[in-house]
Image (tube, rainbow, N blue to C red):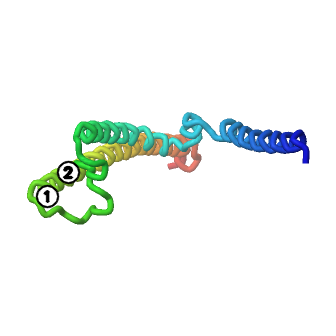
């Protein structure tokens, strides 16, 4: 076997592999929708829910970054997560009272955050429902007036009413 033919075979392998990878990257970049396109394709209710929860997600990220920065400053090993409780040890409490107090405080903070989030969502939902109810009442009043006006006009035009 000559060296030229071996080099040509490897060149073809590299060209074929590179074209497959490049084709995959190009297909991914040009076929996946952007975040804006995805949001634009949502229904109005889902868009409103996305915008409401966007602020909550940002607040969660800010809180997480604070915890990460505090953990980064410590000299403890990486598996000691500090304020963040391990998901595998979610229901287990530490034996030391200091860790127990920290776990309880963190659980209280998490519960408080969840309550605030739920209250905010509930308040926005109630506002939306009350606006819809007010709009329905206004439409109902307008429609009722139209029906009554139409009925009065029909009664005035009726030959039956003229005789009596």
Q: Is residue 60 above or below residue 88?
A: above
Q: Is residue 40 left or right of residue 77?
A: right
Q: Is residue 80 left or right of residue 61?
A: left
Sequence-wise first label, 2 or 1 = 1
Q: Is residue 148 left or right of residue 99?
A: right
Q: Which residue does the image show at 24% across and 37% down from the upper left? A: 73
SS assignment at label 2: helix
Q: Quadrant of residue 14?
A: top right
In the rendered image, residue 123, in percent from the top left (x then y), is placed at 30, 45
Q: Which residue is mark 2?
A: 106
Choose between 82 and 113: the one closer to the eye: 82
Considering every residue shown, the one lying at the far front of the view is 2
Q: Is residue 39 left or right of residue 98?
A: right
Q: Which residue does the image show at 24% across and 50% down from the upper left? A: 110
Choose between 51 and 97: the one closer to the eye: 97
Residue 55 visible in the picture: yes
In the rendered image, residue 152, in percent from the top left (x then y), is placed at 49, 43
Cβ atoms under marks 2 and 1 closer than 8 Å: no
In the rendered image, residue 11, in percent from the top left (x then y), is placed at 82, 39
Residue 152 visible in the picture: no
Q: Which residue does the image show at 59% across and 41% down from the upper left? A: 41
Q: Which residue does the image show at 10% across and 54% down from the upper left? A: 98
């Amino acid at each position: 076997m000559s060296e030229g033919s071996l080099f040509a075979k490897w060149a073809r392998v590299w060209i074929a592999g590179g074209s497959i990878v490049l084709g995959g990257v190009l297909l991914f970049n040009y076929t996946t929708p952007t975040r804006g396109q995805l949001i634009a394709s949502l229904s109005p209710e889902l868009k409103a829910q996305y915008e409401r929860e966007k602020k909550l997600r940002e607040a969660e990220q800010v809180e997480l970054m604070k915890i990460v920065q505090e953990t980064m400053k410590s000299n403890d090993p990486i598996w000691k997560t500090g304020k963040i409780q391990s998901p595998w040890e979610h229901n287990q409490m530490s034996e030391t009272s200091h860790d127990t107090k920290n776990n309880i405080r963190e659980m209280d903070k998490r519960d408080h955050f969840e309550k605030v989030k739920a209250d905010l969502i509930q308040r926005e939902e109630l506002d939306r429902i009350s606006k819809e109810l007010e709009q329905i009442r206004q439409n109902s009043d307008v429609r009722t007036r139209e029906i009554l006006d139409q009925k009065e006009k029909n009664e005035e035009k009726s030959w039956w009413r003229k005789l009596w």
